[in-house]
Amino acid sequence: MTVSPLEAEFDAAMMDIYRRAKTEANYPATIFHRMLIQQRGLATAKQLINATTVSDGYTALWERGRLDLTVEAIVHDNEKWHPLFDADELKRAKRRLADYQYFG
């Protein structure tokens, strides 16, 4: 399966937040890492954003004050990734971040 250059960059960005969560927030996101290995970044992001509840990882990062390392923040904060998601997914990510006071 071939992926677009943008999707390949997104895969790298997703792996980067996994590494950063581990080193900066002392959160070893093993389930998230497994998801990335098994289904790549875009499918992982869509699954997490479209879930009806936040993941355990989202909660763990919120507790550590690091929502900036969530999939929702990565997608919301960088317009470069917006073409990979539909309008509902972008709204859902923003709403979830707002619900957890990401925007102050």
Image (spheres, grey):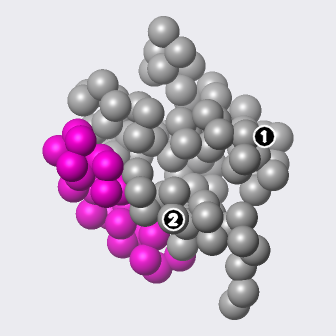
In primary-sequence order, the first of circles 1 and 2 is 2
Estimate the x, y position of residue 11 in percent, counting from the top left. 55, 66
Please state the horizontal and vertical placement of residue 55, each as a whole percent of the image: 40, 46
The foreground one among 20 and 37 is: 20
Percent coordinates x, y for residue 8 in the rendering:
63, 71
Residue 64's place in the image compared with 69, above or below, is above
Which secondary structure lies at badge 2?
A: helix
Residue at 38%, 61% in the rendered image: 32
Q: Calculate the distance from the C-alpha at mark 1 to the C-alpha at mark 2.
A: 24 Å
Query: What residue occupies the far left of the structure in this picture?
Result: 26
Q: Is residue 30 left or right of residue 96?
A: left
Residue 27 magenta = yes
Residue located beneath label 2 in the image: 12
Describe residue 58's horizontal placement relative to residue 81 as left or right.
left
Mark 1 surroundings: few (<14), some (14-19) or many (≥20) residues within 10 A:
few
Which image quarter: residue 67? Answer: top left
| Residues drawn in magenta | 18-39
User: What's under tag 2, amino acid-wise?
Assistant: Ala
Q: Residue at x 69, y 90 (%)?
A: 1
Q: Position of residue 54 (x, y in %)?
A: 45, 40
Looking at this view, is 47 or 79 the one in front?
A: 79
66 vs 48: above or below:
above
Q: Report which residue position mark 1 lands on.
A: 88
Q: Main secondary structure of the magenta part?
A: helix
From the image, state whether disc 1 or disc 2 is nearer to you: 2
